Amino acid sequence: MPNFAKYFPILSWGREYNKAALTNDLVAALIVTIMLIPQSLAYALLAGLPPEAGLYASILPIMFYAVLGTSRTLAVGPVAVVSLMTAAAIGQVAEAGTAGYAIAALTLAGMSGAMLLVMGIFRLGFLANFLSHPVIAGFITASGVLIAASQLKHVLGIDAQGHTLLELLGSIFTYLGDTNWITVVIGVLSVAFLFWVRKGLKPVLIALGLGPRMVDIFAKAGPVAAVIATTVVVWLFELDGAGVKVVGFVPQSLPPFTMPDLSLELMSALFMPAVLISVIGFVESISVAQTLAAKKRQRIDPNQELIGLGAANIAAAFTGGYPVTGGFSRSVVNFDAGAQTPAAGAYTAVGLAIAALFLTPLIYFLPKATLAATIIVAVLSLVDFSILRKTWAYSKADFAAVASTILITLLLGVELGVTTGVALSILIHLYKSSRPHIAVVGRIEGTEHFRNVNRHHVETNPEILTLRVDESLYFANARFLEDTVYDMVAKCPKLRHVILLCSAVNEIDYSALESLEAINERLAASDVKLHLSEVKGPVMDSLETGHFLKNMSGQVFLSQHLAIKHLHS
Amino acid sequence: MPNFAKYFPILSWGREYNKAALTNDLVAALIVTIMLIPQSLAYALLAGLPPEAGLYASILPIMFYAVLGTSRTLAVGPVAVVSLMTAAAIGQVAEAGTAGYAIAALTLAGMSGAMLLVMGIFRLGFLANFLSHPVIAGFITASGVLIAASQLKHVLGIDAQGHTLLELLGSIFTYLGDTNWITVVIGVLSVAFLFWVRKGLKPVLIALGLGPRMVDIFAKAGPVAAVIATTVVVWLFELDGAGVKVVGFVPQSLPPFTMPDLSLELMSALFMPAVLISVIGFVESISVAQTLAAKKRQRIDPNQELIGLGAANIAAAFTGGYPVTGGFSRSVVNFDAGAQTPAAGAYTAVGLAIAALFLTPLIYFLPKATLAATIIVAVLSLVDFSILRKTWAYSKADFAAVASTILITLLLGVELGVTTGVALSILIHLYKSSRPHIAVVGRIEGTEHFRNVNRHHVETNPEILTLRVDESLYFANARFLEDTVYDMVAKCPKLRHVILLCSAVNEIDYSALESLEAINERLAASDVKLHLSEVKGPVMDSLETGHFLKNMSGQVFLSQHLAIKHLHS
């Protein structure tokens, strides 16, 4: 059953599982669990959901991915950008904090899971390639800024709303008078502490003589330390009575069985958000998985990944979670901590289940400001505006796509931002290929090489015009080709032959074929013959199926050199 | 003032206007007017509007186009496909026959006019190129079938509704019992007569010794003859009392001054339809204009055409009309009748104004079945399913786009049909370029030519792998390139050099640049050097602005021959 293992990757790595792998996976799971407890709570807060939803979304989804996913080290669960997109999507159909809001989150996870599954089954993983790298980088950066801004209210201890930067800042400004200064102290100290743990702690620990692995574990435990310290302080000094908002009562429970609302009305309202969350989640996940796999020379199957992530999201929908995907920071920690197989994920799930069952009473006094601080510090590492500088230097078109994505994400929200980015990068590509570079070429004296007359010193002949078309010919540039040929021909009164040098033409679609027919006819009317040279194999194969070659006034030459030799004589 | 004439083409042709042109234009205007009277009434009926709307839409819009358009012979007014699209669009916001329906038609014309104007001012005429020829052909064919089906009810004398083929046929079937047999006789005889005029009349007239121009005029007057004959018959035998539906009272008036409803609600409901009508109308118009201009070696400026058509539609909005564009049949008649300048259009407008003012009482008894017959005969000439066979033979991808466009137009309506066609042709193009042909090449012994190892007998070297990438490198294929290179490299254990032969690479965008960097790094880790050869001028210019070339492990060679010579030694 070779194919069976393809669809259940657990069958291949599970057969070779041994004690060494078990030890490594257990250690990694312990470290990831410690890191994930505060992170899961925080991301649930970001999504506008009760904190336990973050834990639940990290338990069964991980299990399903462990069975179906192809990455050995990807850690699946709530992530920052998808949490923000979830908040934006369900904020439009329900009030945050209501039961309807939580149920809409389940529906969103279920729909997104179903879409990912379908894409995987129909092997549509390639669709993720239609997102340009700089557009994704810009989107992640803008989302990071939005997420950090959305958490400011928790650090200030005020109420504020909004899904765009201006709404958020305006709302914060409106309620600024309500600022709770004790909350601010807790929040600001937490942020400062977490930044110091990231940047300043390592040298200290190394100086103390700790091994690099222990140093890493301590650094990752920073958020846990902040959580414990601030919780104890609030509890000791009863700061919740002084207006410091705390997480409060969290049920002690394994993930509950939940039913998403599958009404047509809700599903059609959430359709586009679910598409965007699926695509963005998949792209984030597959990039992390491929980066980590490359380091160990392992392979990722994008279509099987879709199935794994789809199953994980459906699991989230039925166990009180919300949309999940493979997260960058949690996967890197898992990888660095030495995880060898997806079993590490399963052990992490067990760890989180224990936390959900026994530890939740301990976080009653955990200040929301501390969770907000962990989010802010985590997402600011995603923010990297250098993509603007890099694309500006390399290509103004790419820059335009990135800059629009960032601006629209910040000012009009995540959904419009990413949609614009994708549409714009496709349009820019079409626009560029719709006005291809068409060079007049001539022979470099004494050689068989033909080059652009404007860049090289070459021989030409007033009776022969050779045009090198630097683009595949298809509907978007068919008319442009016609116009250009007519314009150039009009400038050459002695002309008897036009040769289209096709070394860079990788495709001729039906629209372009019609344009070639029109060019052939129009040139023939002025007694000018049309020839082709250096036509590629696949293009020649398709041209031979049409009538064009039979009606063409000239010939097809294997090389430009042969064409000139023949027409010259 | 050279630029002034560019924006007002009338200034250039008006200066050379003489008596010969005047005579020719007057004759053409007379012929076109005779043809347009029944056609305008009929298309208004197709759009669900009162018949006079068709006349009004042909008067001021023609005048405006005459001043601003660049085509000498294009005839602007109601056309079949746009009338059908108008009916589909405003049928969603108002009941046919109500005042709101007519006002929505004005709004649609105004919005479409404004969009065309804006596109013209921002020089976005190239956007029309993003429609593939076969998709348009398929759309026109499917629309022709839909239009013919929508007119069947008038021939049968029954009530029927619907904007898709199944709705229309289902509705006709439901009301089939109400068939008025006198109407059927009038309708079927009219259709038969009109077909005979098209196919059978010419030989008879030629046999009678008439000149070819007179023959043409008689043939075009067929619909007028049918209109007169059936009107007289209905009047004489009082058939309107026997259930034959007639045009009825049409006001005697010049085009009235009307105000479109510019409420946000209506405008947002009509936004997408207005976009589609603008684009489809523009594409139809520009193809006709370019075809006719090419015959007389005249030039059309697509952006100025947008301005001319935009002004015409805005004129239609304020004078009781509905969306208009340059029509195929009316323009061909105008051209064949010898029109020399847009003044012919202005004279036609005068002719139609006279008709609107004096002739409308004469059409009280004109049966709707006759008008339906003229529409059916006219649109069936648009129907040409051979595009399916042609694209099937040439390219399955083009076939898929056409077949989907036709099916969806017929089954789900015009708007979804054309949207799907456009989206699909773009997606197919992206898909094809996302999996480019990548060939391993070797040298044809004793030459400087390098060809695909699978198609030619060539020399290769186990230490050097040369890949020719037959596509521009951009976000949609960047990841595919990485995967392919890694796969091929994994198969060559002795490898020391990889050369990317870039003769067909016309662009490298930022995403592809990042992939090249990743390939370079990964190959370097296995001690394999990456080289480029035959990089095009514009691509080299942009590569030089980035850091990639500095970090590249190998070199850039002007030609593949130099690369092999250098690496071999």
Image: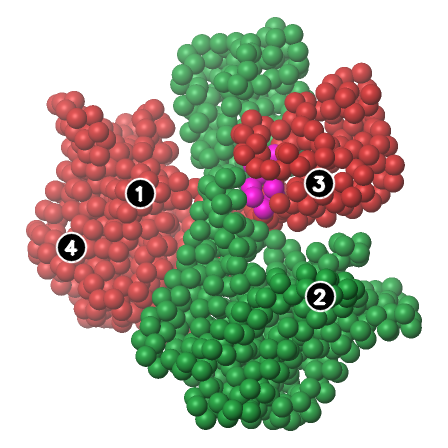
Chain colours: A green, B red
- Count neighbours of disc 2 (C-alpha within 10 A) and say few if under 14, some if 14 to 19, many if 20 or more: some
Q: Is residue B449 visible?
A: no
Identified by mark 2, the residue type is: Leu
Whether label 1 touches label 3, CB < 8 Å: no
Which residue is tagged 3? B520
Percent of width and height locating residue B506:
57, 34
Callout 1 crowding tier (Cα within 10 Å): few <14, some 14–19, many ≥20: few
Residue A385 location in percent, x, y?
50, 53
Q: In this image, B65 relative to B375: left or right?
A: left
- Between the residue at mark 4 and the residue at mark 1, the CA separation in whole angstroms equals 24 Å
Determine the CA span between mark 2 and mark 3: 36 Å
**Of callouts 4 and 1, which one flags the residue occurring earlier in the amino acid sequence?**
1
What residue did someone put label 4 on? B318
As helix, strand or loop, the secondary structure at mark 2 comes to helix
Q: Disc 3 versus disc 4: distance between alpha carbons?
A: 63 Å
Residue A273 in percent (x, y) is at 50, 70
Mark in the foreground, 3 or 4: 3
Stretch of the chain drawn in magenta: B505-513
Is label 1 in a helix, a strand or a loop?
loop
Q: Distance between the residues labelled 4 and 2?
A: 79 Å
Q: What residue sits 67% from the left and 73% below the top?
A: A221
List the residue tagged with mark 1.
Answer: B122
Q: Mark 2 points at which residue?
A: A205
